[in-house]
Image (tube, rainbow, N blue to C red):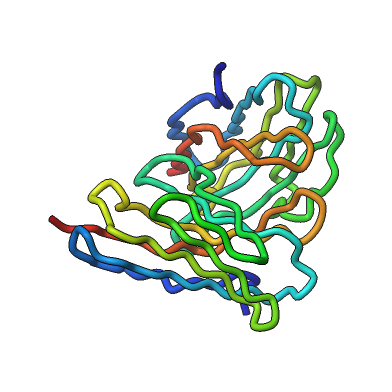
Amino acid sequence: RKEVEQDPGPFNVPEGATVAFNCTYSNSASQSFFWYRQDCRKEPKLLMSVYSSGNEDGRFTAQLNRASQYISLLIRDSKLSDSATYLCVVNKAGNMLTFGGGTRLMVKP
Amino acid sequence: DAGVIQSPRHEVTEMGQEVTLRCKPISGHDYLFWYRQTMMRGLELLIYFNNNVPIDDSGMPEDRFSAKMPNASFSTLKIQPSEPRDSAVYFCASSFRLNTQYFGPGTRLTVL
């Protein structure tokens, strides 16, 4: 079983739609959680950290469920520019990040 | 400020040749990471350094891979000899302490 698992998608949604991605992780000792965004043929970039109480950044909402070991990302009012691969990332110890395989989102006009 | 710089951006080589990838981290960052990304395996951590010292190299696939960080502003990842299965995008990232990791643009390696 992979340490961080994501549905690879693609998720094809129309502009303005709300879309949600989930991610599960296997190591209960994991300490920090993040969502990274990766555009085609580009490097990953931090989208947002995920806090235990849940957090929001504009149209993006991230939530963490430690008991069930899953993380979610909700995108409201999708824009064409949201089309990318979203990587679920878990920090289990020190500064070592473990990346999920990514979920591809395609927002269509 | 300049971000993480990697060179070359693209490398095409023949099987058996030595390949050297280079990275300049963001000035002031004390952690440096080397990752490899493939379609099959996704993004994998190969090795990371703290204050120029290798901390964990458990992700290095085999002895053909080696990494060095002779000073705070430069690191290399070397593959010798290279094989077709080494074809991937290699990313370098850096961070200050345990804060956000910033990735370089990557080196796209093709081994024929």
- The residue lying toward the viewer, choosing from B87 and A51, is A51
Seen as rendered, the residue at the extreme top is B1
Q: Position of residue A102 (x, y in %)?
A: 46, 62
Q: Is residue A32 left or right of residue A42?
A: right
Q: Position of residue A13 (x, y in %)?
A: 23, 66
In the rendered view, would you say B36 is above or below B6? below
Quadrant in which residue B78 is drawn: top right
Q: Position of residue A66 (x, y in %)?
A: 69, 76
In the rendered view, would you say A63 is above or below B72? below
Quadrant of the rendering where the N terminus of chain B is positioned: top right
Q: How many callouts does the rendering have?
A: 0
Q: Residue at x 35, y 46 (%)?
A: A40
Q: Position of residue A95 (x, y in %)?
A: 76, 48
- The residue lying toward the viewer, choosing from A80 and A96, is A80
Q: Residue at x 54, y 45 (%)?
A: A46
Quadrant in which residue A93 is drawn: bottom right
Seen as rendered, the residue at the extreme bottom is A68
Q: Residue at x 50, y 58 (%)?
A: A87
Quadrant of the rendering where the C terminus of chain B is positioned: top left
Q: Residue at x 83, y 29 (%)?
A: B52
In the rendered view, would you say A16 is above or below A68? above
Quadrant in which residue A4 is drawn: bottom right
Q: Is residue B77 left or right of residue B4?
A: right
